[in-house]
Every structure is written in C-alpha cells, then in structure tokens.
Image (cartoon, rainbow, N blue to C red):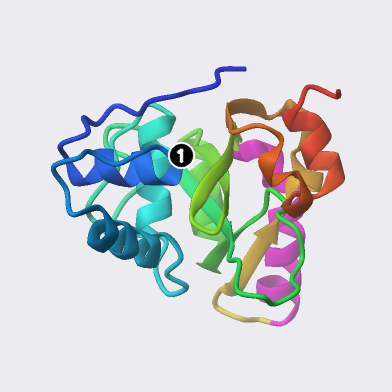
Amino acid sequence: MVNVTKGLSGPDTLQGLQTRFAQGHQLPDMVPSRLLRDLLFEQANDKNSSTFREGVTADLAGYEQNPDKLGYDVLHHNVEIKPQNYPMDGRKRPRLSGGGNFTDFTWDRHHKYLEDNVTMLVSGFVNGQISYILKFPYELLTKRIEAQLYEQCTVRGNRYCRGASFSFLHYGEESEVVFFAGHRHEPYIQKRLFRHLTGGS
C-alpha cells in the first residue's frame, strides 16, 4: 500500500489547494483562509458535480485529471474515477461502500472498457475530505455489469442501463489500496471495506 501524503500538483495551483483541503492540511498563509476554505468545502460536497473529488483522486493517485467531459477521467490513460462522498449533514445514510455507478451504460461501452483495459479508481470522502482510494481493473466488474445490462437492455429492451452500480463486494480484495487516511473515518466506512483498507487488522 502507498499512503500518499502529497499529490502531483503544487500548493500554488487550484488542484494543489483542493488536494491539501481534501487531506485536511493547512492552507497557505497568503490565501484568505476562511473564504477559500468555505469555497473548497462547497466544491468538495457538491451533490451535483464530482469534479472536485475526481480531481483530488486523480492527483493523489499520480494522474492528471482530464478537463474535458469526453473520454476517460485522466489524461493519457484509460482510467475511470468513481468517488463517493459522505456529507456530515445530520442525515442518516449508508456507510461508504467502495461503490460507484455508470450512468446510461450500454453493451458497446462495456465492451469498449474491456478492450481498452480500463483501470478503476474508486475513492471515498467524508464531508469532502479524502478517506481512501482503491485501484483495480474494470474487468473485475464484468459479472456485475453484465447482469445489469442483460436485465435492462436485453430483457427489457432498453437502449441503455440508466445506472449500472457496483460496490466493494464486486471486486473486493483484488483491489490495491493507493491511499488511506487512517482510522479517523472508520464509522463511515463499511466494515468489510475497512478491514481491507487496514490490511485485515
């Protein structure tokens, strides 16, 4: 396991500030910290966009985020990023499951992912702060994704599967722990996933 403490981006870039915030590090003194922290907090917990969380995940895993909506999530690599966030808004919700969702998925897209040997980066955040990053080949999800495509597209005749979901149960211990922030987020992570993150301890 590589416990990353810094991303690729420097502290004077937006990505660098986002990564520092997501790791709970102090922000540079020259920045109006309260205003910037509030802005970063809003970005980190945005329910309608995962751009912040994708960027932090890519940075800490050693990739550069793709700013374009087309193509894969990082530049020069076939990598898909699926971040989950557990917002501390007082609502009771399921713990982080190491899961993700492919929106409007099709058989063609599934086959392309397999042909492109796509790598998955699945990350978990608690209130906008990074907790873990897991890395594994997309092909580990084949059985789970094909079952949903078969039901939605083949049996029901839909053009696409609106949401092809997965969790840690579908790829499990074959995933590599790229980043782990330690035990502070344990209450918000499913037990089986947390055991994997801690090496079974």
- Residue found at x 29% / y 64%: 39
23 or 77: nearer the viewer? 23
Task: Give the prevailing secondary structure in the magenta stretch.
Answer: helix
Can you say which quadrant of the picture contains the C terminus? Answer: top right
Task: Identify whether 77 is placed above or below 141.
Answer: above
Task: Identify whether 167 is placed above or below 15.
Answer: below
Q: Residue pushed farthest top? A: 1
159 or 90: nearer the viewer? 90
Q: Quadrant of residue 28?
A: top left
Q: How many marks?
A: 1
Q: Which residues are magenta?
A: 138-156
| In magenta segment, residue 154 | yes
Structural crowding at the residue carrying mark 1, measured as other residues with C-alpha within 10 Å and reported as few (<14), some (14–19) or many (≥20): many
119 or 61: nearer the viewer? 61
How far across and how far down the image is residue 151, in percent? 76, 72
Say left or right for 107 vs 188.
left
How far across and how far down the image is residue 83, in percent? 53, 52
| In magenta segment, residue 141 | yes
- Residue found at x 67% / y 62%: 165
Task: Identify whether 52 is placed above or below 65.
Answer: below
Residue linked to disc 1: 23
Can you say which quadrant of the picture contains the N terminus? Answer: top right
Which amino acid type is shown beneath numbered disc 1?
A: Gln
Q: Quadrant of residue 179?
A: top right
Task: Identify whether 181 is placed above or below 148.
Answer: above
Residue 105 visible in the picture: no
In terms of secondary structure, where does tag 1 sit?
loop
Residue 2 visible in the picture: yes
- Residue found at x 68% / y 45%: 185
How far across and how far down the image is residue 49, in percent? 39, 68
